[in-house]
Image (cartoon, grey):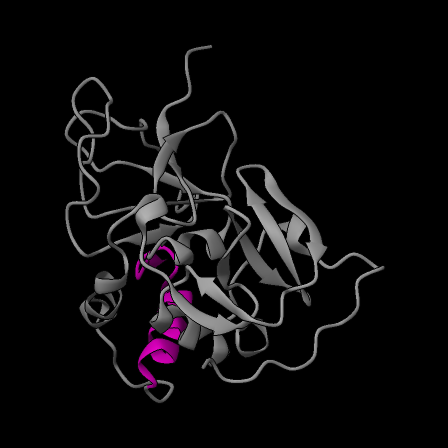
Amino acid sequence: MGAPRRNRVTPSGDVVATPARGTLMGNRGGCLHSRDGRIVRSHRSRAWLVCLLEFRGRRRSVMAPGLYTELFFLDEATALAAGHRPCFECRRGDALAFAQALTGRDPGEAVRAGEVDDALHPHRLPLGRDRHTWTARAANLPDGTFVRLDGGDAVLAGGALRRWSFDGYGPGVAAPSGPLAVLTPEPTVRALADGYPVALHPSARPRTSEPARPPTASPA
């Protein structure tokens, strides 16, 4: 078995190599890799997607020369933190729900994918540990939001902060009462607060010993 490909995405948007597998696939608008499989650019367009691993029986050779670069995520919350959004083809229902929640449009009102991309793109760059963050208190953030925690990344889920890894989330710890550095883009957090049902990895489920979280207020 060869070395793992560099195609796994962190919550801060880095693309790294790891043998761990993801639960969702995506792309950033085109081919990011060279003919020998090296990542040579961060993105090709503003269409940063989160897709299903399987759709209508399609089969692809991962990172084939000249074709779009397949990226993989632990879960949807990770992808959203990195600045991606649901695909309008393979996840059309989720894409419409996310777009309506992000833009504040009424259900059934048309929202173009480009509108969502335009809203998100200023919050995506730079990538990695230099990624811009904004501040809010945990009590004002919805589940599925990523924050910085002790030099790493953690998601709010089930009343606690859970440290992220490529294999899943750690045990829940109490969120501090003060302001947190928030990684998930502000427009995406507004969509989560408005009810978009972000998908979390099973390891983020509350343990029986963890208290229920009080209702979430609107983001500050």
Is residue 32 located in the magenta-colored stretch of the structure? no
At horizontal 35% and vertical 76% (from top left) the residue drawn is 102
Q: Residue furthest top?
A: 1
At horizontal 35% and vertical 33% (from top left) the residue drawn is 59
Q: Nearer the viewer, residue 214 or 38?
A: 214
Q: Nearer the viewer, residue 34 or 110?
A: 34
| Image vertical order of residue 139 relative to residue 89, above or below | below
- Residue 199 position within the rendered picture, expressed as x and y whole percent measured from the top left: 54, 59
Q: Residue furthest front?
A: 178
Q: Nearer the viewer, residue 34 or 132?
A: 132
The answer to which quarter of the image holds residue 181 is bottom left
Q: Residue furthest right?
A: 209
- Residue 66 position within the rendered picture, expressed as x and y whole percent measured from the top left: 14, 29
Q: Nearer the viewer, residue 139 or 69?
A: 139
At horizontal 49% and vertical 39% (from top left) the residue drawn is 22
- Residue 105 position within the rendered picture, expressed as x and y whole percent measured from the top left: 32, 86
Question: The magenta stretch spans which residues?
Answer: 84-104
How many discs mark residues in the rendered view? Answer: 0
Is residue 97 located in the magenta-colored stretch of the structure? yes
| Image vertical order of residue 55 relative to residue 86, above or below | above
Does any portion of residue 58 appear in the rendered image? no
At horizontal 34% and vertical 73% (from top left) the residue drawn is 187
Q: Tell me the quarter of the image containing the C terminus.
A: bottom left
